[in-house]
Image (cartoon, coloured by chain):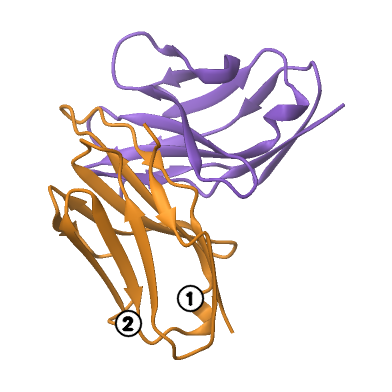
Chain colours: A orange, B purple
Amino acid sequence: DAGVIQSPRHEVTEMGQEVTLRCKPISGHDYLFWYRQTMMRGLELLIYFNNNVPIDDSGMPEDRFSAKMPNASFSTLKIQPSEPRDSAVYFCASSLRLAGRETQYFGPGTRLLVL
Amino acid sequence: AQSVAQPEDQVNVAEGNPLTVKCTYSVSGNPYLFWYVQYPNRGLQFLLKYITGDNLVKGSYGFEAEFNKSQTSFHLKKPSALVSDSALYFCAVRLGGKLIFGQGTELSVKP
């Protein structure tokens, strides 16, 4: 298996632009997670899905952030409009829930820089 | 609130010496505990987990962790550190369908 795939790996954009991050989870996994990592705040869970349905979006910072999972093999995290404070590494992870003993597998991350 | 804490931002060890990266947890009920490692410019990689059973859990790359219920700790250990073990280490606890991560500990192993 190729593991969790994220694109792009790097994104540089200007403030006010729309940014879309993409994730392909491991085939067969039924949970998908979006995280943000910064020096100041560490690793934060933004949102997670179970069987394509958003379960907990309490970590989404504000309305500028939105996430979708139209099918089991694809998810997007969108920021519109982007701001310099959104600069971070965004990780996608997936897991297969087995009575709560799941292990999350992380993608390589998207490094976002908003100028 | 259910959480994990990693009291050390950085741990420095000489190659060949034993290493310990500390983690304490605060959860109600029986905890599901995890250790992940992050190498530079990479995503997190699973190392090991404790669900139930033997308090000493063995994981990848020669790492192990000891679950101590009385001290509410889950410290990561390795008998002999390698320079290649230098990375950022995260402890995590499962809460519902998600993991709550500690702030991370930077491990530096010097030759």
Q: Which residue appears at 40% of the width and 12% of the height?
A: B55
Residue B63 vertical placement versus A49 (above, below):
above
Q: Residue A91 placed where, x, y %?
A: 43, 54
| Residue on which the image places disc 1 | A86
**B99 or A14, nearer to the observer:** A14
Q: Quadrant of residue A106 in the image?
A: top left
Q: Residue B8 placed where, x, y %?
A: 64, 42
**B72 or B94, nearer to the observer:** B94
Q: Residue B60 placed where, x, y %?
A: 52, 19
The answer to whether B33 appears left or right of A10 in the picture is left
Please tell me whether mark 1 sits on a helix, a strand or a loop.
helix
Q: Which residue appears at 41% of the width and 29% of the height?
A: B72
Q: Chain of mark 1?
A: A
Q: Chain of mark 2?
A: A
What amino acid is found at the position of numbered circle 1 in the picture?
Answer: Asp
Q: Quadrant of residue B94 in the image?
A: top left
- Which numbered disc, 1 or 2, marks the residue that appears first in the sequence? 2
Q: Residue A85 placed where, x, y %?
A: 52, 79
The answer to whether B52 appears left or right of B57 in the picture is left
Please tell me whether mark 2 sits on a helix, a strand or a loop.
loop
The disc label shown at residue A64, or none: 2
Q: Which residue appears at 36% of the width and 61% of the height?
A: A22
Callouts 1 and 2 close, C-beta under 8 Å: yes
Count every numbered label the image shows and give the total: 2
The answer to whether B57 appears left or right of B63 in the picture is left
What amino acid is found at the position of numbered circle 2 in the picture?
Answer: Arg
